[in-house]
Image: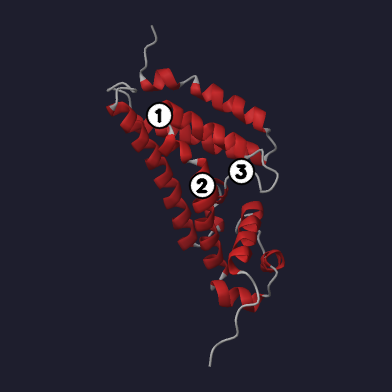
Amino acid sequence: MAGRPRSFDRDEALSRALQVFWSKGYADASMTDLTGAMGINSPSLYAAFGSKEDLFREAVRLYTDTAGVALWASMREARTAREAIEGLLLATAEANSRYDRPKGCLLVLSGAHPDALPDGACGEVAKIRTDSMATMEARLREGQAAGEIAADADPAAIAAFYTTVQQGMTFRAREGATAAELRGTARAAMLAWDGLAGVRRS
């Protein structure tokens, strides 16, 4: 006998759960918060998603496939390594000027309190963040191979520096920094590019 069809849109419910986790964090997102936002009851949540942790992990994947892809687009599309880094920082500033979603980065904010996450979810968040920095480093190494970055420069150190800047911008956004203020931070950070990349201006 076929089971009863779900009376809610699973994708829409997941999108609403993402907003709750993004705004409140994993630990502070209660089941009441989640079911209220998703428009379902607890049994329906468990039937559709398994558990709160499973729901969070699925929300993280939705985040990386949507907001994350847009944020990191410059790593794929920019002509030069410098433009790729600047594009990421400016995209971070602009993302935090939107009024239709929470401020800051779900992954960075979740990683700030790893003890609040179950082990599986914590490991998944950490891996995504590590992979993101590796993506940046790989783009920098492409720039180095193309002669945009000096042969004796350290792409890993450059990636670590700009990752730290980008993550710091997300915390400032959560604290109320405006897009204009964050753009100023991005431009200030790019002033360090020549020294880090070993670029000599004539």
Q: Can you give x and y, in whole percent of width and height, for residue 176 in the image? A: 70, 37
Q: Calculate the distance from the C-alpha at mark 1 to the C-alpha at mark 3.
A: 27 Å
Q: Residues within 10 Å of mark 2 (few under 14, many from 20)?
A: some
Which residue position is annotated with label 3? 104
Which residue position is annotated with label 2? 68
Which residue position is annotated with label 1? 79
Q: Is residue 65 visible in this depiction of the protein?
A: yes
**Occupied quadrant, residue 59:** bottom right
Q: Can you give x and y, in whole percent of width and height, for residue 68 in the image? A: 51, 47
Residue 143 left/right relative to 99: left
Q: Residue furthest bottom?
A: 1
- Residue drawn 69% across the image and 48% down it: 100
User: Which residue is nearer to you in this view: 153 or 44?
Assistant: 44
The three-letter amino acid code for the residue at tag 1 is Arg
Q: Residue furthest top?
A: 202
- Residue drawn 50% across the image and 51% down it: 64
In the rendered image, the vertical position of residue 128 relative to residue 153, given as above or below = below
Q: Calculate the distance from the C-alpha at mark 1 to the C-alpha at mark 2.
A: 20 Å
**Disc 2 element:** helix
